[in-house]
Image: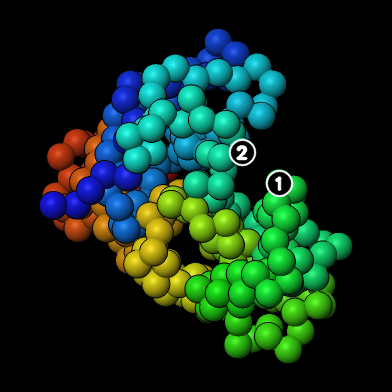
């Protein structure tokens, strides 16, 4: 029986009066890749940003309902602690441009004022880059700027930066949309490796990608969670006609 790491109960998110995520109830099993798909503007990214409390950084936003991480309400935790436990990787690779590869990886520790020894830093950098399948490519150039890397390498550097904090959950918001096919394939392979240690929630517009990488898929439409099932079931036998219409390209 898979254990649940993340659960939402009647969860809603608002921009002002506008409710963009509506009464979402979902249970995310540990060490799975969960794809979140749906048309543009259906609340996918907002939902993702709520999971690590980034939504509230935008003025005029609010939420209602519950998100539990390991049965603890994330809205009763300090937001910095939430973001330690729930890392995030964005659509476009965004290494800090003025920092070296090494300093990019440990940036979370510095930003949060956490003092760690040089040997510990070295170990965290190496382990995180190993887990992000980047170590062998950059170990001779750790003190060069992260921006000299290719797009795919930069995105893996951002993944290394997120997992350096040892999160329980990793959120990826369209992590390959700015990448070429070879880099995309590399990130997809990496996701399968990462789920051994983390739970991944991936927003994607790419249905083929959802089918390739995810264990379960959630389909959002107009802010509602329409369907959530094992990915194979979702793509071969969707229960809701709206899911079927989306998968077969009747609307996008």
Asked if residue 183 can be seen in this view, the reply is no
Mark 1 Cα shell of 10 Å, populated few (<14), some (14-19), many (≥20): few
Residue 203 image label: none
For residue 211, side relative to residue 91 (left or right): left
Give the number of the disc on residue 112. 1
Provide the secondary structure element on which disc 2 rests. Answer: helix
* Callout 2–callout 1 Cβ contact below 8 Å: yes
As drawn, 233 above or below 70: below
Residue 175: image x %, image y %?
A: 54, 58
Q: Residue at the location (59% across, 33% down)? A: 79
Work out whether residue 87 can be spotted. Answer: yes
Residue closest to the eye, 81 or 41: 81
Q: Residue at x 65, y 17 (%)?
A: 60
Question: For mark 2, what is the residue?
Answer: 80
Q: Residue furthest right?
A: 98
**Residue 126, how many percent across, how many down?**
61, 77
Q: Is residue 30 above or below residue 79?
A: below
Which quarter shows the C terminus? top left
Label 2 crowding class (10 Å Cα cut-off): few <14, some 14-19, many 20+? few
**Mark 1, secondary structure of its residue:** loop
In the rendered image, which quarter is residue 149 located in? bottom right
Q: Residue at x 67, y 27 (%)?
A: 58
Chain-order first, disc 2 or disc 1: 2
């Amino acid at each position: 029986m898979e254990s649940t790491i993340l659960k939402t109960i009647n969860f809603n998110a608002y921009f002002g009066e506008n409710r963009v995520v509506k009464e979402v109830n979902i249970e995310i099993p540990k060490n799975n890749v969960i794809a979140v798909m749906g048309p543009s503007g259906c609340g996918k990214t907002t939902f993702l940003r709520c999971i690590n409390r980034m939504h509230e950084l935008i003025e005029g936003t609010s939420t209602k309902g519950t998100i539990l991480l390991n049965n603890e309400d994330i809205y009763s935790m300090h937001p910095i602690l939430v973001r330690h436990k729930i890392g995030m990787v964005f659509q476009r690779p965004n290494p800090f441009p003025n920092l070296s590869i090494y300093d990019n990886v440990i940036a979370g520790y510095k930003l949060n004022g956490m003092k760690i020894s040089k040997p510990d830093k070295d170990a965290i950098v190496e382990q995180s880059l190993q887990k992000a399948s980047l170590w062998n490519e950059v170990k001779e150039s750790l003190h060069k700027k992260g921006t000299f890397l290719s797009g795919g390498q930069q995105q893996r550097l951002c993944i290394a930066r997120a997992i350096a904090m040892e999160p329980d959950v990793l959120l990826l918001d369209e992590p390959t949309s700015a990448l070429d096919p070879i880099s995309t394939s590399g990130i997809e392979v990496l996701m399968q490796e990462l789920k051994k240690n983390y739970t991944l929630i991936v927003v994607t517009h790419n249905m083929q990608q959802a089918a390739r990488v995810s264990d379960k898929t959630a389909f959002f439409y107009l802010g509602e969670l329409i369907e959530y099932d094992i990915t194979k079931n979702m793509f071969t036998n969707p229960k809701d006609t709206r899911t079927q219409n989306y998968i077969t390209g009747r609307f996008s």
